[in-house]
Amino acid sequence: MCGICGIFRGHGNPVSMDELQKMTDTMIHRGPDESGFMVDGDVGLGFRRLSIVDLEHGHQPMTNENRTVWVVCNGEIYNYKSLRNQLMRRGHIFTSNTDTEVIVHLYEEYGIELVHHLRGMFAIAIVDLNIRELFLVRDHFGIKPLYFSQGSDGLRFASELRSLLTTSPWDFSVDEQALWDYFTLQYVPTSGSLIRGMQKVPPAHYIRYHHGVLSMTQYWAPKYQPVYDKPESYYTDAVADALERSVRRHLQADVRVGSFLSSGVDSSTIVALAKQTRPLTTFSVGFEDADAQFDELVIARRTAEALGVEHKSTVISSSDIINRLPTMMDSLEEPLGDPSALALYFLSELASRDVTVVLSGEGSDEIFAGYPIYHEPKSLAMFKYLPQWSNPLLRNLANMMPHGVKGRSFLLRGTTPLERRFLGNIHVFHEETKDILFQKHAFGLAPDATYRLTDPIYQQTAMYDDITRMQMVDLHTWLPGDILFKADKMTMAHSLELRVPFLDVDVFDVASSVPVEYRVRDNQGKYVLRQAVKQWLPDGIWSRPKLGFPVPYRKWLRESMHDILRDAFQSSKFRHFFSEQYVDMMLSQHRSGTRDYGRELWTLLAFLMWEQAFQARWQTSATAHQTTTTPVLTTAQLN
């Protein structure tokens, strides 16, 4: 795991080493072991290294024999050994045992078509000096981040947003569409950024930059192609085999490897398989204020004991959260209304004291259909048999019912088409609620603006059943935008490399061949996965329901964090942008227990903490560049 960055001006103006040094200095936590640079006129690459494979020779940027192709890579190529052997048979000469050098020679052999040979997690920059061309490549699922910005001085890219913001003064202007989307989804969409002009390379895409022209190409797309008329054992055997092979690949390292361990089937499976190959330490986290029914620590300890692995855990208090909240939010770089990021931050800190690489279970719920929401199509099936004219009547009836009344949500969701009720795993503020929150006048956006993110996915998956369509939405939005986003940011804040064996292309190919009735069955998600892995797990673990880093944030917002949120809102430059009356109502009703606004308030708090962190960063950048303009955090409508 590393940090990469670079500048490609493309019009003759030279790149200075000082610029690259400043960019890499902001990412020391991603690669504390060493730095590396390449400058050739108007192009430059920077690199921060976290040494994991071939500790002595894995320096980057890497180049070919005649120094015409240069590569920096953040991540791991798990099939690099077989690729290396193939390339050696074709006459390529290697000077190291690293995966990055394989990318150099793959480019010599295949050009940008090399993307079809890679298996792993990666963000890659390739510079071809022969034709003065730059390629930026991101892995299939979006495990590793890659930001870029294009302006009059060319193209800049980096593993982290802060690296792009450090080398020149920038206008702290918020993208209105991204902000609107954030308050719906609790995260900024996959290809965007909350700061205008800053973008992300989407998963499974590469960018080509040549003569000042940027083009983007998608090189892979997830597809579900079920194989029917097979016995259950056919699917469970295939899943078990794919997982065993994937975990072995993900254990490649010349440093200590550990694993996160919760109370569920995903992390337990990874631990059970990994410990067959090498000694393993596992890590768990809990909270002082957590309800006993949501405390994973006891079960995690028992699982570790049953599997025969070393286990370490820590318990976090609300004061720990309050003291570290600004640092955690700054580490995220963008607002994220997912409170489980807090647990992941402290869990990563714990693990980083003992290991450099950690395995985790992200991706299983998306590819094997593990979320409870995937049961909804079955529970709402009765509405398909009602006449169409009854839907508006039932919806009106539901709208007349008070919030919290049993049956209201059922009627609303049952009479709403899937394409409008499911935007992904989390839906915080609905469109009509955002109209109130933002006082309607704040945005010049079309109604239902956020649906532009999911409408193309639904159009492309019209032939699928509803559960598979929901999985496809989550694979394209929720997984990279929330799950993998926080996984990278929170682990890298502690110089810890996180690997996710479920998000392996070969594992996905097997999962996508499983018919939906073996993914969700008997009111149980991930059915085929559970049946496949129960051979390796203690009794009861393979069938346990998902908890997913339960964080008692609702209680905190009624108590210690109530005033923190209120004060942050009162001091925000965005205060007049929101309806103060609506925010006060949410705070009051949540504190009194009249209504649960925990998710909405946490999403707002995350945004306000992000504002504070990045306003401070703006001031630092402005001072460094002797900018006299007062930093103003604003959208175009507020100017």
Image (cartoon, helix red, strand yellow):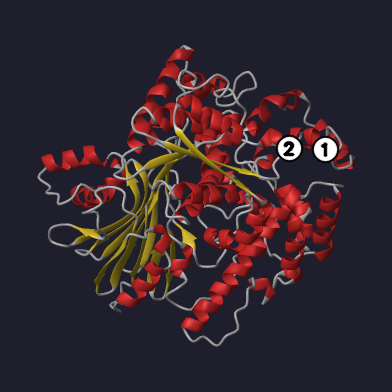
**Numbered badge on residue 617:** none
The correct choice, above or below, for 535 with respect to 557 in the image is above
Q: Nearer the viewer, residue 310 or 486?
A: 310
Disc 1 is placed on an element classified as: helix
x, y percent for residue 608: 67, 64
Q: Nearer the viewer, residue 539 or 304?
A: 304
Amino acid under disc 2: Thr
x, y percent for residue 101: 22, 51
Q: How many numbered marks does the figure carry?
A: 2
Who's the residue at 11% across and 49% down the image? 93
x, y percent for residue 181: 63, 55
Q: Confirm or deny contact between disc 2 and disc 1 (CB under 8 A).
A: yes
Gap in Å between the C-alphas at discs 2 and 1? 8 Å
Side of 265 where 609 appears, left or right = right
Who's the residue at 89% across and 42% down the image? 402
Side of 523 where 558 appears, left or right = right
Query: In the rendered image, which residue does mark 2 sit on?
Result: 416
Does residue 397 show up? yes
Query: In the rendered image, which residue does mark 1 sit on?
Result: 395
Does residue 429 show up? no
The correct choice, above or below, for 210 with respect to 82 in the image is below
x, y percent for residue 3: 38, 59
Tell which residue pokes out farthest to the left in this image.
91
Amino acid under disc 1: Arg
Disc 2 is placed on an element classified as: loop
Q: Nearer the viewer, residue 465 or 260?
A: 260
